């Protein structure tokens, strides 16, 4: 009889204990659901855990005890009331980290509002600041390639943003916009970045960005690689499994922590067993700083190999192709690049906009006149780049429009044409002119820079191999 009473009391304790624990968890969830937005379910469960784990431990202890104690009697005989209390997340050690700081590399044609919307940041109140504040007006013309750093709340509201405003890459002057008493204010600040030189290497298995991620290379550095070799390697068609890269780049640190990646200083990219090398060099004599190969020739060619950073070719240049809409055989005088709607389209060379508007089956269409009788054409655009009008001068790499499916198109893609004296040529096989090499004096200085960077890569490679063994 005594054993039966003990078992009955133990079962009753478990039943009341789990009922109590269920009410505690429900209360915790109600608080978390009101405190955080719907998209933060994983954080809500963290908060519920803070509520419930101590209680669940107590329940297990109670269920394991069959002695008649004051706590046991109170749990069985009293009615439990659970009241939601304000939880200080910082004191609990939950949600004290801030995962809502992000950075985005600025593309050509980006506006501040458009960039923030792409990052999912609420831009309410910024338009007034940009129109009225003298410092904030510097954010109207963003410089492509720079990085915008943003902090937002859990609801997506902007807390602060930082933009490096100086023309000199090594300058530390930035514009800081932050919310003070519910209003945005802008100020100039000096950020004390320190530079570290970083070496990384990787092997292509599926894509450049996957390999870069595995090697610990920031996306901004991977994008620089595509820009450096944009005239030598077609990253849509020519990237192969087993390709390798070694890269030396600047890492800008703030208070001992990595803040962002800087400029690539040297890179070797082996594509289809063929090595490609590039070195950052600033020659004298008024020549533009940029990337040079081992022979001292600038890697900036007259024309880029492709007007899109990443895509795939869906239809090539051919004198005879069955048109999917017109249902007849005709020449296809360009190359089609399949890409999502809204993908930025770059001018493959500097020139002057000759046409910008609607042109029959081409839909939204841009034609650019270049030097020596060369011209390029871009069709089926969803919309045009900012300021792309007839007579407007554009530089190589400027965004002149965005991929779409206007005109005679069965899906979103870019139709790209390359013409010589108005005669269509195959963009994939046309010879791209090389630039003049460095003069003797500049070449000697370049070789000293090149040898120093090569030595750095060799030492880093040897150290990595030694650690692996």
Image: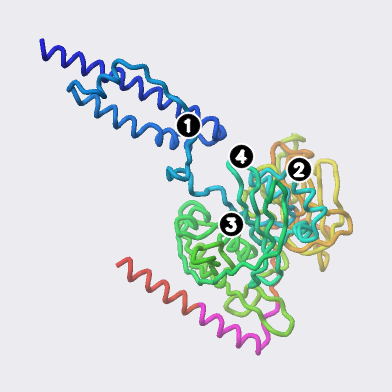
Side of 377 where 59 appears, left or right: left
Q: Is the C-beta separation of discs 4 and 2 under 8 Å?
A: no
The span from disc 2 to disc 1 (Cα, nearest Å) is 52 Å
Which of 292 and 425 lies nearest the eye of the viewer?
Answer: 292
Label 4: element kind: loop
Q: Is the C-beta separation of discs 1 and 3 under 8 Å?
A: no
Point 80% across, 63% down: residue: 374
- Point out residue 439 in the picture as x, y percentages from the top left corner: 68, 86
Residue 290 in magenta?
Answer: no
- Point out residue 3 in the picture as x, y percentages from the top left corner: 11, 15
Q: Is the C-beta separation of discs 4 and 3 under 8 Å?
A: no
Q: Mark 2 or mark 1: name the one nearer the start of the chain.
A: 1
Residue to which mark 4 is pinned: 155
The numbered disc on residue 235 is: 3
Other residues around mark 1 within 10 Å, as few (<14) / some (14–19) / many (≥20): few
Image quadrant of residue 187? bottom right
- Residue sitting farthest toward the top: 1
- Of badges 4 and 3, nearer the viewer stands 4
- Of badges 3 and 2, nearer the viewer stands 2
Q: Mark 4 or mark 3: name the one nearer the start of the chain.
A: 4
Which of 101 and 325 lies nearest the eye of the viewer?
Answer: 101
Point 75% across, 58% down: residue: 139
- Of badges 2 and 1, nearer the viewer stands 1
Q: Mark 4 or mark 1: name the one nearer the start of the chain.
A: 1
Which of 17 and 101 lies nearest the eye of the viewer?
Answer: 17
Residue 308 versus residue 146 in the image, above or below? above
- Of badges 1 and 3, nearer the viewer stands 1
Residue to which mark 1 is pinned: 85
Which residues, given as a range, are shown in magenta? 436-453
């Amino acid at each position: 009889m005594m054993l039966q009473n003990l078992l009955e009391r133990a079962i009753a304790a478990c039943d009341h204990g789990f009922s109590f624990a269920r009410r505690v968890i429900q209360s915790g969830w109600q608080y978390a659901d009101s405190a955080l937005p719907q998209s933060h379910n994983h954080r809500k469960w963290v908060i519920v855990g803070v509520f419930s784990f101590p209680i669940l431990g107590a329940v297990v202890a109670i269920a394991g005890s069959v002695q008649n104690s004051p706590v046991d009697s109170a749990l069985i005989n009293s009615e439990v009331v659970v009241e939601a209390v304000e939880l200080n997340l910082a004191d609990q050690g939950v949600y004290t980290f801030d995962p809502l700081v992000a950075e985005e590399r600025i593309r050509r044609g980006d506006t501040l509002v458009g960039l923030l919307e792409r990052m999912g940041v609420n831009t309410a109140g910024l338009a007034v600041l940009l129109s009225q504040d003298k410092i904030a007006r510097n954010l109207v013309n963003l410089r492509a390639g720079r990085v915008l750093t943003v902090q937002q709340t859990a609801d997506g509201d902007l807390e602060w943003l930082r933009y490096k405003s100086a023309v000199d890459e090594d300058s530390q002057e930035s514009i800081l916009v932050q919310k003070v008493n519910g209003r945005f204010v802008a100020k100039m600040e000096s950020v004390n970045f320190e530079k570290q030189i970083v070496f990384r290497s990787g092997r292509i298995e599926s894509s450049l960005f996957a390999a870069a991620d595995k090697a610990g290379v920031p996306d901004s550095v991977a994008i620089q690689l595509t820009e450096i070799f944009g005239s030598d390697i077609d990253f849509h068609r020519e990237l192969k499994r087993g390709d390798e890269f070694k890269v030396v780049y600047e890492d800008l640190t703030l208070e001992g922590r990595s803040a962002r990646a800087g400029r690539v200083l040297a890179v070797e990219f082996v594509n289809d067993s063929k090595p490609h090398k590039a070195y950052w060099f600033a020659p004298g004599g008024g020549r533009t700083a940029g990337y040079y190969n081992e022979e001292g020739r600038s890697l900036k060619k007259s024309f880029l190999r492709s007007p899109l950073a990443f895509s795939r070719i869906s239809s090539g240049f051919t004198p005879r192709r069955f048109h999917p809409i017109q249902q007849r055989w005709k020449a296809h005088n360009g190359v089609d690049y399949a890409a999502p709607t809204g993908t930025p389209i770059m001018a493959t060379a500097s020139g002057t906009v000759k046409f910008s508007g609607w042109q029959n089956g081409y839909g939204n269409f841009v034609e650019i006149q270049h030097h020596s009788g060369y011209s390029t054409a871009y069709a089926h655009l969803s919309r045009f780049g900012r300021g792309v009008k007839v007579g407007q001068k554009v530089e190589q790499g400027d965004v002149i429009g965005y991929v779409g499916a206007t005109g005679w198109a069965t899906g979103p893609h870019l139709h790209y044409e390359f013409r010589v004296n108005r005669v269509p040529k195959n963009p994939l096989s046309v010879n791209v002119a090389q630039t003049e090499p460095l003069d003797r004096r500049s070449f000697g200085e370049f070789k000293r820079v090149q040898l120093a960077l090569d030595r750095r890569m060799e030492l880093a490679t040897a150290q990595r191999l030694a650690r692996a063994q």
